[in-house]
Image (spheres, rainbow, N blue to C red):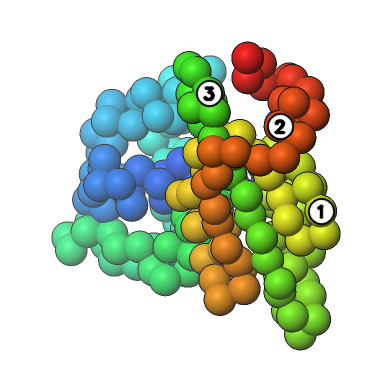
Amino acid sequence: MSKYKDTSQSVDILLQLLALGTITGAMLIAPNAVQILDKPLDLLLNKIDDREKQRKLSRLRSYMKAQGLVRGDYDHGIELTKKALRRIKLLEYKNIKIESPKKWDNKWRLVMFDIPESKRSARVGFTNKIHSLGYQILQQSVWIHPYDSKDVIAKTVEHFGISEWVTYLEVEEIAQQEKLIIRFRHLKLV
């Protein structure tokens, strides 16, 4: 793993933990922070001793301050900046996925949109994202998926700022359903 990727991953983990309140800013820079962070950072720090872990956390804290992701100090705690919150939100967006239920509920989820040309980059980004989530095109600007994905689509729509041009529907019946079941056979609907 490259040094940049290692640092970036470590920063992402620490920011998410701070945002969730799992650790406080004071813990991040406290001398005993290594024990608190052992499990979340285990994958990144598991091959080094406690002194080196403490040094690494100190470097990460300094890096995060220099990048404008956190502010504050030991006495007053560390606070996430707007830049950090945007980074966390982007990370959450990148990691969203549609959960597979144990059994399909026999409903289809349709996403229809008519995003204007002035929002072309948002339209392309949105289309790419729903495709990566497993949606398949039904017809122009109409995409379909068998699993509940209302929250995932809502977050994606919010990310691109296109809520006024996107509609999410759940339907129980659809023409040529047998063909759609075959198209989604990798999900083992039946």
Instruction: Give the residue drawn at x 63%, y 55%.
Output: 111
**Disc 1 or 3, which lies upstream in sequence?**
3
Q: Residue lying furthest left in this view? A: 75
Q: Where is residue 163 shown, x and y percent of the image?
A: 54, 71
Q: Secondary structure under badge 3?
A: loop
Q: Label 3 sits on what residue type?
A: Trp
> Image quarter for residue 30?
top left
Position of 154 relative to 59 (above/below): below
Check whether the beta carbons of the residues at disc 1 and disc 2 lie within 8 A of each other: no
As helix, strand or loop, the secondary structure at mark 2 comes to: helix
Q: Is residue 24 left or right of residue 107?
A: left
Residue at 73% in and 20% down: 186
Dot 3, how many residues are within 10 Å of its Cα: few (below 14), some (14-19), or many (20+)? some
Mark whose residue sits in front, 2 or 3: 2
Residue 32 falls left or right of residue 114: left
Task: Name the residue tied to disc 1.
Answer: 139
Look at label 2 and name its amino acid: Gln
* Tally of numbered tags: 3
- Residue 150: where, in percent of width, then height? 49, 49
Answer with the quarter of the image where residue 62 lies.
bottom left
Estimate the spatial distance between the alpha carbons at disc 2 and disc 3, rounded to whole Å. Answer: 14 Å
The part of the image, by quadrant, that contains residue 117 is bottom right
Identify the residue under disc 2. 177
Nearer to us in this view, 96 or 106: 106
Callout 2: few (<14), some (14-19), or many (20+) C-alpha neighbours within 10 Å?
few
Left or right of 173, for residue 179: right
Q: Earlier in the sequence, mark 1 or mark 2?
A: 1
Task: List the residue tagged with mark 3.
Answer: 104
Q: From what the image shows, is residue 177 above or below residue 26?
A: above
The local secondary structure at tag 1 comes to: strand
Type of residue at label 1? Gln
